[in-house]
Image (tube, rainbow, N blue to C red):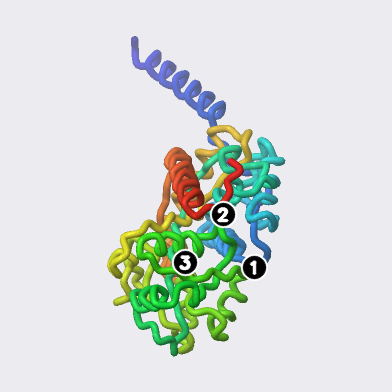
């Protein structure tokens, strides 16, 4: 082959590669992306979703606009159904929490589970803390538990539903220690805090950021962390294990899913996009400011994690006497 023939061969090969590249070009969104959340405006998932949309724009990661759609109701059931109805729409994603795993286990109204949706990526783990009023006589978690042993059923904890992390960790601690205290359920976080600050209950499980605001205001004291690793915002406050209680707090995840019919190529695009977001200064600052645990997992690992959490919750609910429907 002479030089001219070589040049022609290279040109043909390059053209074929270009054609192949066009045929297999990576999918990208071409219109506004809807991120569906299960909370109303101001809820935890709503705030995170809006922060993600802002960070995507600031870091110039997404070629189109992202908007948040609130589909509240049924502890995630309404939002899960809304995503499933989008079927193969690649411009729809959902921001989910462990509530989406817990709900279908105990509610027959939940027709769609996370197994019916496409896992995309895990983003965060939500730690929590045990907190009491600043003027509480309980200086440590052991103080509270010993008092609960001495006064069975007299002390009270505010929380969400009986299937929430608040109640499950209470059940686990009671099982491990023999202590007994009551659980008072409230529909909203603000009501749970008000019950504690008003002296109607003695202790609560609360998110670190919200607890920090109350601690700085001189209204709360934090006794222990529900986290595998100590939170930087609470130096000197022990984890449950460090406090002497080797009980498992089921992970509270925040993750992204897609409608059931989207292609693997679409899933790969979103997985890669959120991996890029995780590396940005905006994301790192958000995680630090909100006392969250960065915990990125790819699609395959997220699927395994969902199954693991589901199995753990099923065991915990059975031990607590909570009726399961699945």
Rate crowding at label 1 as few (under 14), some (14 to 19) or many (20 or more) other CA atoms within 10 Å. Answer: few
Confirm whether residue 281 shows in the render: no
Lower position in the chain sequence, tag 2 or tag 1: 2
- Reading the image, the residue beneath label 2 is 99
Tell me where residue 159 appears, x and y as whole percent. 55, 69
Of labels 2 and 3, the one closer to you: 2
Confirm whether residue 156 shows in the render: yes
Tell me where residue 14 appears, x and y as whole percent. 45, 24
Lower position in the chain sequence, tag 3 or tag 1: 1
Q: Is residue 131 left or right of residue 29?
A: left
Picture residue at 70% right of the left edge, 51% below the top: 78
Query: For the residues marked 2 and 3, what is the alpha-carbon distance in whole angstroms?
Result: 22 Å
Question: In what element is the residue under mark 2?
Answer: helix
Question: Viewer-proximal residue, 18 or 4?
Answer: 18
Query: For the residues marked 3 and 1, what is the alpha-carbon distance in whole angstroms?
Result: 27 Å
- Reading the image, the residue beneath label 3 is 286
């Amino acid at each position: 082959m002479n030089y001219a023939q070589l040049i022609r061969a290279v040109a043909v090969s390059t053209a074929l590669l270009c054609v192949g590249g066009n045929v297999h070009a990576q999918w990208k969104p071409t219109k506004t992306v809807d991120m569906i959340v299960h909370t109303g405006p101001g809820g935890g998932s709503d705030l995170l979703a809006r922060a993600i949309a802002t960070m995507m724009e600031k870091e110039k990661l997404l070629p189109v606009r992202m908007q948040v759609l609130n589909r509240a109701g049924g502890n995630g059931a309404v939002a899960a159904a809304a995503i499933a109805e989008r079927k193969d729409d690649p411009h729809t994603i959902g921001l989910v929490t462990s509530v989406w795993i817990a709900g279908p286990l105990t509610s027959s109204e939940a027709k769609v589970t996370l197994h019916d949706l496409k896992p995309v990526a895990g983003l965060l783990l939500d730690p929590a803390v045990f907190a009491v009023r600043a003027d509480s006589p309980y200086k440590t978690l052991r103080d509270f538990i010993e008092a609960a042993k001495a006064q069975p059923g007299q002390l009270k904890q505010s929380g969400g539903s009986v299937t929430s992390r608040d109640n499950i960790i209470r059940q686990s601690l009671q099982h491990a220690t023999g202590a007994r205290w009551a659980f008072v359920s409230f529909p909203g976080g603000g009501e749970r805090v008000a019950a504690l600050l008003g002296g109607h209950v003695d202790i609560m499980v609360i998110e670190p950021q919200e607890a920090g605001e109350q601690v700085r205001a001189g209204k709360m004291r934090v006794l222990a962390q529900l986290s595998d690793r100590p939170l930087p915002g609470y130096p000197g406050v022990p984890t449950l294990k460090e406090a002497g209680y080797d009980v498992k707090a089921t992970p509270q995840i925040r993750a992204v899913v897609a409608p059931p019919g989207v292609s693997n190529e679409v899933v790969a695009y979103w997985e890669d996009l959120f991996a890029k977001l995780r590396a940005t200064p905006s994301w790192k600052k958000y995680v630090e400011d909100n006392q969250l645990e960065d915990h990125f997992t790819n699609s395959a690992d997220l699927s395994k994690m969902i199954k693991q959490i589901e199995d753990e919750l099923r065991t915990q609910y059975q031990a607590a006497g909570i009726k399961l429907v699945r």
